[in-house]
Amino acid sequence: MDLHQLFVFTKVVEHKSFSKAAEEIFLSQSTVSSHIQALERTFNTRLFDRVGREIILTPFGSRLYQWALKLLLLKDEAMLDLKEGMTELRGMIRIAASSVPGQFMLPKMIKHFRNQYPNAVFQIEQTSSKVVLDKVLNGTVDVGLLGKEFENDKLCYIPLLKEKLVLITSNKTEIKGPVNIQDLLKYPFIMRNSGSGTNAAIEQFLKKNKISKEQMNIIAYTESGQTLIQFVMEGIGIAIISEIAAREYTKRQLLKMKEINGFDDERYFYLAYNKNKTLSLLARLFIEHGEKGLYHWLNGS
């Protein structure tokens, strides 16, 4: 058994596929299979069960995977300690992000991080806050960026940025701000789907003002924040979105942004990770940047 064999083994586990693992680490599928077979000979036991087209970890394989992660992490830490510079660190960080942080925060965070670790590679999924939560909990990603804090003992949250929600309209829509929420009920409204942090904040505000969704003229629900903004720009309806997102479009005079009276509740965008998941050294460094406040410049950047 050697560390390279263990590295290959972890990639097969993560991708649940020999061919996809081979593609990521630039080896032939036959070479990957040879490494797995060598490990199985070393331990004289099977690491995977082949069920149809799927491969499933055996109980022994599951135990080996946890040890492999720890050994590979220890190797990275040793290399970091023995090298003068840290730019040699390489690997992949898997991130799930909700709409606003995925579009307006994450690119800047990655640019900042890769200035120090240029060999870091990122795999990014953009989805709702609820799905981000699920992916962090089940360990399919290393880090999540989301606009809502869900209570769970397994999760650690690092607040990155505080912001508020605002009303957006097309340039042709004549609404003078600041506006009252009751004044908006007659306008066609575009709403995010229920899994988003923005939707949760809007529903809380409506409840506070004793307004039900049925009283609103909601004409469309969408999973995509970009689609929602495009609807507004086309004059199809109005919407309430993150001020960070709205600011980017108002700078380019693509839409109008208005304050909403009484909508003063501020929210955070968080970096979240599962404290029970063994993370690579690169993923841990990405998280430590957040813990040390190295992303503080996101506000107003």
Image (tube, helix red, strand yellow):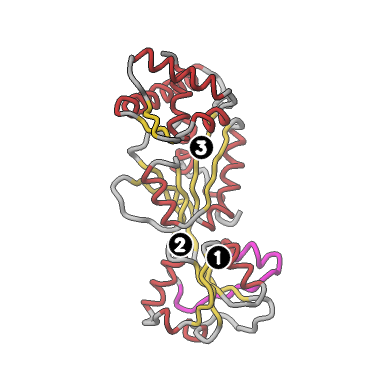
Q: Which quarter shows the N terminus?
A: top left
Mark 3 near mark 2, Cβ–Cβ under 8 Å?
A: no
Near-viewer residue (27 or 199): 27
Give the mark nearer the N terminus: 1 vs 2.
2
Q: Which residue is mark 1?
A: 243
Residue under the image location 41 percent in, 32 percent down: 55
Kind of residue indicated by mark 1 = Glu
Q: Secondary structure at mark 2?
A: loop
Give me the C-alpha separation between circle 1 and circle 2: 15 Å
Q: Secondary structure at mark 1?
A: helix
Residue under the image location 52 percent in, 83 percent down: 184
Residue 220: give x, y in percent of width and height.
Answer: 53, 73
Near-viewer residue (119 or 62): 62
Residue 197 left/right relative to 25 = left
Kind of residue indicated by mark 3 = Ile
Residue 227 left/right relative to 283 = right
Q: Which residue is mark 2?
A: 196
Residue 97: give x, y in percent of width and height.
Answer: 50, 51
User: Can residue 256 be found in the magenta stretch?
Assistant: yes
Residue under the image location 40 percent in, 27 percent down: 69
